[in-house]
Amino acid sequence: MGTTRVVAAEGLRYRYGETVALDGVDLEVGAGECVALLGPNGAGKSTLVTIVVGLRAAQEGAVRVLDGDPRRAATRRRLGVAQQTLGFPNTLTVQELVTGAAIRGGLRGSAAGPVLAELGLTDLARRRVAKLSGGQKQRVQLAMALVTEPALLVLDEPTAGLDTSARRHFWQILARRREQGTAVLVTTHLIEESAEVADRVVVLDHGRVLADAPPEELVARLPDRTVTARTRLGRGELERLPGVLSVTPEHDHLVKIQTRAPEELLRVLLDRDPDLSELRVRDAGLEEAVFALTDGGTAEEVAA
Amino acid sequence: MSVLGVRIFRVELRDELRAIVREPTSLFFSILMPVGFFILFNLLYGHGSTQGLSAGTAMVATFGTYGVITVAALQPGIGVAQDRDLGWLRMKRVSAVPVGISLAAKATAALLYGVGVLLLMGVAAAAFGTLDASPWALLRVAVVLLLGTVPFTLFSVAVGLRFRTGATIAMLNAVLFPLAVLSGLWIPIRFLPSAVKHIAEFLPTYHLAELGLAQLGDGSALLHVLALVITTVVAGTVAVMSYRRARI
């Protein structure tokens, strides 16, 4: 998987007036691959996605999707897109929406049945979408994206509003599709989730790609460790301890401390607070790695 | 249109008609109000005569014009604005649904509304005994009025592509009601101040109503057709410009 290029974008640039949204972005997604686009608000993720799905033309650079121009209808019919902000016409039922999506994608309406079953929507098929919960609507949108058997799925915050079990089920469905060669491009704020499911993460900020690597590789580049403990020491005092990068108070005196010198920090902590409890040390996660990149603090190390 | 295009049009039209049937509140402004006005005025003045026609028959053309432009000027634009607000129009674009097909489905659904309005008015006039025209003449009136909705639909879509739903409803109604009054669609224009007659000659609604009346009497149609063609070209241009600037 991943050898056939489903998305191939080079040197994409896009400006909104004086604001630079994309500043020479390259992006590749291979068949069966899952790529997560990460970055803060305004990083350029949405602009990049709208170019990939053919809603917008890049002002500079080239993009090929499924070896075709994404602005062409024939290419777009091979995509499945789920957008977070989509609202449905309240007058339609689940069945009608998914059937309509199948027909618009050039298939028969009967293609809806198996997808509704796969997403656990069969019992809701006759229910009007206005009467569904947020999570159920999310599943309807995914069904609409999957019903055309797309070669590329573009998903915007696909698991927002889903409970843990529904999330797991969602990623299992996607895993099956990926085994069949479907490529997935996902934008999400759930960074740790993308660490579990994405083959690669592309970190964008201010319209530039800061990193493009497997999540574990990005994490490995970051020397930070997170120390969690319950302590009576105050935030100011903790911030002055040797090797401390940041302190995040949680609740009931529980704090998360970011450090590059965990051994030294632990010695000092235990010395100053004999009642220290619930002590844990763990490697930095993808969230810290992305934060380090986009916050600029240790960006050079992570991007290296 | 390709086979796929036809299938997509059918789905789009089916969705539009479902929206009509399942949201009956929209029927109030689009059907009940024009038909209700027609019945009221027919009961009051239907047995009189105007321009050599029974007043009840003439009202089929004038109130019929009001009825069809109400649906043609409100439904498509409001539908487009709602679809934009929901992100539904964007979803269709991503799904490669040609925007022309989507808009054609909205216009067709509005036309079907219009057919309903005209049928109800015709039945009501016949029931009150004020209808005095051949079926052929009435059919011509219906065809002319329905075809004459094209510029109003284009204008409606142009507004819906640029404004949010609430603003679209307000703007279209703000345009529609003065057009109806100043074109003599509710009260015959000869009963209105002469200044109104001069204004009416510049209004497409007036020309559409006169074109409808011409099917029932001997009036000339040429000037009115010309006025409506010019209006269609202008409305079409505005709709295209609106689409190009629309944030979908």
Image (cartoon, rainbow, N blue to C red):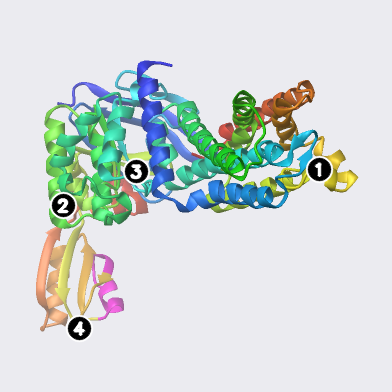
Residue A36: percent from the left, percent from the top? 26, 41
Q: Residue furthest right?
A: B194
Cα separation between marks 4 and 3:
45 Å
Q: Which residue is mark 3?
A: A83
Q: Tell whether A65 sits left or right of B218.
A: left
Same chain, marks 1 and 2? Answer: no
Q: Amino acid at mark 4?
A: Arg
Is residue A243 a member of the stretch shown in magenta?
Answer: yes
Q: Check the image and name the residue furthest to the front.
A: B129
Q: Earlier in the sequence, mark 4 or mark 3?
A: 3
| Discs 3, 1: same chain | no
Same subunit: marks 4 and 1: no
Where does the image place residue A264, in percent across and percent down from the top left? 15, 67
Q: Earlier in the sequence, mark 4 or mark 2?
A: 2
Kindly state the secondary structure of the residue where label 2 is placed. helix
Chain letter for mark 2: A
User: Magenta stretch containing residue B156, yes or no?
Assistant: no
Q: Amino acid at mark 1?
A: Ile
**Residue, disc 1:** B189
> Closer to us: mark 3 or mark 1?
1
**Which mark identifies residue A166?**
2
